[in-house]
């Protein structure tokens, strides 16, 4: 299986012939209905019936990817004696089975029971205090990207099951960051689901926009060291079945982070449009005007765009294989009174 083409076929075959059996869940029938190559056909009126999608839907009672797009956790806010804003968070590591495609469950390790974990949002200069409890079955940490003291880095102080640790630091620099577990073996702890988006707004904020958080991730459902399912925000094809509504001409700001394990690179490609890319979001000057951004693991970019035409527009990984294995969604661009 060293030939990449053969490996790709074997991954698709696993899914087409029954991912459920392949991952040992024993439930009947595969939820993923992939077409043979070349059968995708024209863009349909209803994206839910696109050939490249799933049959059925996941249960969203525990985690709803549509809600997650706009779910920003700004913490419990107070003022320190010197006047600095304090944001306090409670984050708990929990083992939990999550549904990554209809009927396909993955035995995840989670922050607060969800993958990705809560999107932590603050403004540059705020003090963050994160009380981390480990109620999982393995040692874990929280490693934040950013500038902070060594004991707050979450790289060495492994928090054992039943134990807790408090991370406290001033949020800097502003930009689009992430946090994740930094316990070894690292790729196992990350790919099991211990990661989240960390947004530090510039003082004064960014211009008002329709803001969306998108974490590109993947799941190795049979633990063979490669992903069988790809997504933004965990659920394969979710935004194809549930297109993201946006208004014609409105400013859309997507916070795109790549945490995908096992693959060297992932990407975001937008249809019928171009976006301004602010790599890492640490500079207010755009770095690119393009329609595709490629990101290695841990890289991220803020993308800003407005739609000139109404209708359904796809967004997806430009790695076609990832797109066909779940990392594919649709924007539904509506005129103001439509
Ligand atoms: Cu861990």
Image: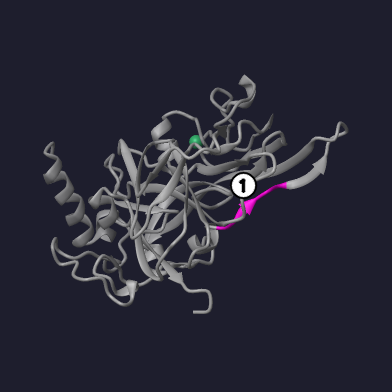
Name of the residue lying farthest toward the bottom = 338
| Position above or below: 226 against 160 | below
Residue 335 horizontal side relative to residue 87, left or right: left
Q: Does the magenta stretch include residue 219?
A: no
Image location (x, y in percent) of residue 271: 33, 58
Name of the residue lying farthest toward the right = 81
| Position above or below: 6 against 98 | above
Residue placed most toward the observer, 262 or 141:
262
Whether residue 295 is visible, yes or no, is: yes
Image location (x, y in percent) of residue 218: 36, 48
Residue 43 horizontal side relative to residue 286, left or right: left
Residue at 42% across / 54% down in the picture?
234
Residue placed most toward the observer, 124 or 59:
124
Image location (x, y in percent) of residue 89: 69, 43
Residue tagged 1:
206
Residue 63 horizontal side relative to residue 46, left or right: right
Q: How many labels does the image show?
A: 1
| Position above or below: 333 against 109 | below
Residue placed most toward the observer, 291 or 5:
291
The part of the image, by quadrant, that contains residue 129 is top right
The part of the image, by quadrant, that contains residue 53 is bottom left
Q: Main secondary structure of the magenta part?
A: loop
Q: Is residue 74 magenta?
A: yes
Residue at 81% across / 43% down in the picture?
78
Q: In which quarter of the image is the N terminus?
A: top left
Q: Give the range drawn in magenta.
A: 70-75
Residue at 57% across / 56% down in the picture?
209
Whether residue 102 is visible, yes or no, is: no
């Amino acid at each position: 299986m060293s030939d990449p083409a053969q490996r790709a076929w074997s991954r698709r075959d696993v899914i087409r012939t029954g991912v459920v059996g392949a991952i040992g869940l024993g439930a009947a029938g595969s939820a993923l209905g992939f077409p043979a190559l070349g059968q995708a056909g024209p863009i349909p009126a209803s994206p839910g019936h696109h050939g490249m999608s799933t049959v059925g839907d996941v249960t969203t009672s525990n985690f709803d990817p549509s809600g997650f797009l706009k779910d920003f956790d700004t913490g419990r806010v107070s003022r320190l004696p010197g006047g600095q804003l304090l944001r306090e968070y409670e984050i708990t590591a929990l083992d939990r089975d999550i549904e990554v495609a209809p009927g396909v469950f993955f035995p995840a390790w989670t922050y607060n029971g969800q993958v990705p974990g809560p999107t932590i949002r603050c403004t540059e200069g705020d003090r963050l205090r994160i009380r981390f409890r480990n109620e999982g079955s393995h040692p874990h940490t929280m490693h934040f990207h950013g500038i902070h003291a060594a004991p707050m880095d979450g790289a060495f102080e492994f928090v054992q099951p039943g134990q807790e640790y408090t991370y406290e630091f001033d949020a800097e620099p502003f930009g689009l960051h992430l946090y994740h577990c930094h316990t070894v073996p690292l790729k196992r702890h990350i790919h099991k689901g211990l990661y989240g988006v960390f947004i530090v707004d510039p003082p004064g904020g960014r211009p008002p926009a329709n803001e969306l958080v998108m974490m590109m991730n993947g799941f190795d459902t049979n633990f063979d060291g490669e992903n069988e399912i790809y997504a933004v925000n965990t659920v394969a094809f979710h935004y194809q079945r549930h297109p993201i509504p946006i208004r014609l001409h409105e400013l859309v700001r997507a916070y795109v982070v790549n945490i995908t394990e096992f693959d060297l690179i992932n990407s975001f490609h937008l249809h019928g449009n171009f976006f301004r890319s602010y790599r890492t979001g640490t500079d207010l000057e755009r770095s690119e005007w393009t329609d595709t951004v490629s990101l290695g693991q841990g890289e991220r970019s803020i993308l800003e765009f407005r739609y000139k035409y109404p209708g359904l527009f796809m967004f997806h990984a430009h790695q076609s294989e990832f797109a066909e294995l779940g990392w594919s969604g649709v924007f539904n661009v509506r005129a103001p009174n439509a």
